[in-house]
Image (cartoon, rainbow, N blue to C red):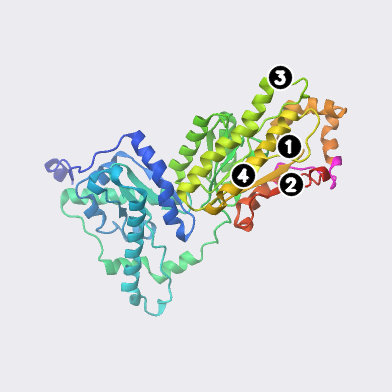
Amino acid sequence: LTRARRKKRYWNPPAYRTESKARRDAWLFEMLPVIRRVVNQKGKKVLVHDDSPDVLAFVNARDSRRISQAGPATPDHMLRTKRLPLYLDLPGRDLNRLNPQGIVRQIESYAQAHERYFKNYRSLLGRAGFIQMLDPYPKVILVPGVGMITIGGNVHQANVVAEIYKHSISVMTQASVIDTYASLSERLAFEIEYWPLELYKLSLAPPEAECSGYVGLVTGAARGIGRAISEKLISLGAHVFLADLDFKAVCAQAEAINQKLKTGHATAVRMDVTKAESVGAGFQQLVLETGGLDFVVSNAGMAHVSSVEKMKLDDWQRSFAVNATGHFLVAREAVRLLKRQGTGGSLVFIASKNVLAPGKDFGAYSAAKAAEAQLARILAIENGEYGIRANIVNPDGVFEDSGLWEHIGGDRAKSYGISRHRLEDYYRNRNLLKTRVFPQDVAESVAFLISTKSAKTTGCILTVDGGIKEAFPR
């Protein structure tokens, strides 16, 4: 191999140029959700992108399309990557001319080819002919100038597919340096891919978790309600991007959740919900790392205690910036992405009992939260036809692990004419069930609103307050 390399310095000359990093990212941000829409037809998938030098050298090579369609490097690889990758053809070798419709046509053509392949060789299964066709959509997509996209039920699975196919690339390129790369015949490949014993082993795998393959964003996730929601959804199989202004704290929470649940499904994101650029960057990170979006929990908030008479304009504006405009900026970006993806989705807004029953000296918070709730209703009205649901959770008096009460607890106690240490009991005793409300209670409600159990629910207010009669939705 070394001697052959000396004689033949390059295994294959490039036919495509590598796009700039900015151009690759922009293309992926636009097209990954489109690809995800198509490959999600047999179950939710996560998409991972690889643009390492070896991958780019392969996808850009003159003969890469022909060589990639020769077949897998080993039978074991095929069980993970399928027999063939999809090599995207660029019209006129120009990435700019490959539009979403063209991508969808090529993916569907790949799936139709797999269906023909299955029908042609199904008789080889003999008495095992009852076996159903596997997911016909690709697990590896090669894009000249951009790199490789791999597909799996979660990020780990997609990364495994990537690592295996990178090994296949190594085998194919080194074989091509020596001579001509060849693989199994189509018939032999089918007998391995649809080997009944292997398929039986796959059938013994445990059932998928309720939110397996889901990807979502939770804002205000560094502690309290946001953290509990993130942990709950990850425990159900979702990949959650934990967003917060306090990046150090949210990184620590994501690491703690991953260690506790023994997954890599928690990813920290730095996000200031009051700045459109920061929100946009957070969603771009989400798409580039997982391919799309299924839900958003808009939870980030803050509170200020003051009568209207004594309130400073800056405090009023700050409350609306976070508790109203922040939800608008997050929802706007989410809806744009969900519409481009075209598979529906769920938006859940963490509002407050104060939406329906405002409190004394809590005007800035109550008014901004009412705006948030009205925004959620409008989103439900505007986006129902696209399968995008918007619902509201109204908690009350959630003290555990809450940064909010550390800042306003003393002032709220003064508003009620009680001492600070009696505040939590005051909130517990004012609800009908005489109970404390915990972050995990809110998380359970959010999980319901994101799951298929609430597939027919939108524009709803779900109270998690122990029963505040003044705050009953009417």
Nearest the camera: 432 or 267?
432
User: Which structural element holds mark 4?
Assistant: helix
User: Which structural element holds mark 1?
Assistant: loop
Residue that mark 1 sits on: 400
Q: Is residue 163 visible?
A: no
Name which residue type carries label 3.
Answer: Lys
> Going from the N terminus, do you reach mark 1 or mark 2 first?
1
Between disc 1 and disc 2, the foreground one is 2
Q: Looking at the picture, how far across and down is residue 56, in whole percent?
A: 28, 42
Circle 2 Cα neighbour tier, 10 Å, few/some/many (<14 / 14–19 / ≥20): many
Tell me which corner region of the image, top left, top right, bottom left or bottom right, holds residue 229.
top right
Q: CA distance from mark 2 to mark 3?
A: 31 Å
Residue that appears at 70% across and 37% down: 370
Kindly indicate whether the residue at mark 3 contacts the one at mark 2 (C-beta within 8 angstroms).
no
Name which residue type carries label 2.
Answer: Thr
Residue that appears at 36% across and 34% down: 22
Circle 4 Cα neighbour tier, 10 Å, few/some/many (<14 / 14–19 / ≥20): few
Residue that mark 3 sits on: 312
In the image, the segment drawn in magenta is: 429-440
Q: Looking at the picture, how far across and down is residue 157, in whole percent?
A: 45, 51
